[in-house]
Each structure stands twice: as structure tokens, then as C-alpha cells.
Image (cartoon, rainbow, N blue to C red):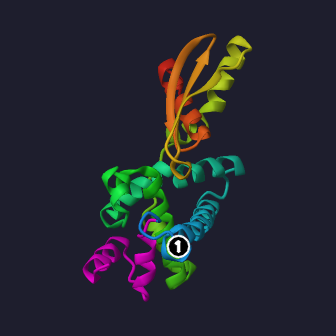
Amino acid sequence: MERELIQAVEEKLGYIFQDPRLLELALTHRSVAHEPRSNNERLEFLGDAVLQLTVSTYLYRRFPDMPEGELAKVRSLLVRESTLASIARELELDRYLQVGEGEKRSGAQQRDSLLCDVVEAVYGAIYLDGGFAQAEQVILRHLPAWDAEEIALLDAKSTLQEYFQQRAKKLPMYTLVQETGPDHDKRFVVEVHFEGERLGTGSGTTKKEAEQEAARAALARLGIQ
């Protein structure tokens, strides 16, 4: 990767690499290099752990009176795929992510799952290059804001279940209606029904995520906050 591109990413991150090869590796998808040491999958694994610890520590210190369950919900909001993909776009990592020609033609650089992975890989690269404190600074600098309504919708399935449990003593049913993509990049579509009526449809890279999206759609349709 050209030095000008490395510098552009460093400027966005607010961090200068001692070893720019780590950043280049973090921006290399396995469609370019299949060998584990030549693509960003191992850095992604490491960066995920650094991200989880950073956000957990931040929330623990900032909200000393927040119970464990609420802390977990806020953390889920801050580290979920869509949030990390938004961070990647804000940092313009989609412009610098190196993918194979086939992936490029399919628009892989705009796919939330790949953008989430590259953010975690970059965090892992910063951790290896400068240590935990440096990675923590970069992660916290780019954490998004959130509000109470977003937190309430995180566990939309539980909210929807409680709604019907209280009113009808029955539970909504979730049905997988579509599954597409290769094993490493699956996409699921799920519908949620109650007594034969479709209330919402959701999609995601896991069945659980698709179910949550379907439940959110159902809550919106029912006007439930």
C-alpha cells in the first residue's frame, strides 16, 4: 500500500503507526491473501477482544450506578455490527480496504460485515503497534453517542415477548424465510408472526440479529416504545 494511503488512514484514526505494515495487514481482506498471516482475520480476532475490554471498562467507570444488565445492553449497542460499520465509513476505511476483484465487483467494501471486521482488525493493529492505552484512546475517540430509546430496542425480542405474554398469554413465532451467501458471509431473513399475522421482517448476518430486527419492526408497527 502506498505511503500516502497509509498516512490518510492514520490521519483519520488520529494515530501514527510505528510499523505501517500492521495497518496494511489490517486493511487486507482474505480475498486478496488467503494465508492467515497475510490477511486481517487474526487481527480482527485480537481487535474484538481489545474493543470489548475498552468499552466494558469505559462503561464501568462512567456509570458507577448502572446495573450489570444495563451495562451489557449499552455495550451491545456500541460494539454491534451496524455501529462498527458506521465507524468504518466515518473513517473512510471502505475506501482503503483491499479486497479481491470478485469481492470488489460485488460491492463487498460497502458490506456491513466486512466493514465491522476491518474496524476490529485496525484496533488490533493499533494494540500490537502501540499497546492497550493507544488502542483505547482511538476506540473511545470514535465511540458514537446513544440514547435511552436505542438501548430499550436492543433486546426487542424480550420486549415483544413481554407485550404478548401480558396481553394474550401467548408468544410470537419467528420463521426463517431466506438464507443467502457463502458460509463466511451468510445473510438471514426472518419474519415474526402472532396468531398467523406477520408483524415484521428483519435481516442480519446471524439468525439472532435477524430476529431482533424483525422484533424491532414489529414493535414499530404496534407503536410500542
Query: Is residue 190 highlighted in magenta?
Result: no
Overall secondary structure of the magenta section: helix
Tell me if 38 is positioned left or right of 4 in this view: right
Q: State the residue lying farthest toward the right.
A: 169
| Residue 202 to residue 75: above or below | above
Q: State the residue lying farthest toward the bottom.
A: 18
Could you tell me which residue is drawn at 44 percent across and 63 percent down?
A: 31
Residue 145 picture location, percent across and down: 44, 52
Q: Which residue is mark 1?
A: 35
Residue 101 picture location, percent across and down: 33, 60
Residue 90 picture location, percent across and down: 34, 59
Query: Is residue 6 highlighted in magenta?
Result: yes
Q: Which residues are magenta?
A: 1-29
Secondary structure of residue under mark 1: loop
The quarter of the picture where the N terminus appears is bottom left
Could you tell me which residue is drawn at 41 percent across and 70 percent down?
A: 27
Closest to the observer, 19 or 99: 99
Residue 200 visible: yes
Closest to the observer, 151 or 8: 8
User: What's under tag 1, amino acid-wise?
Assistant: Glu
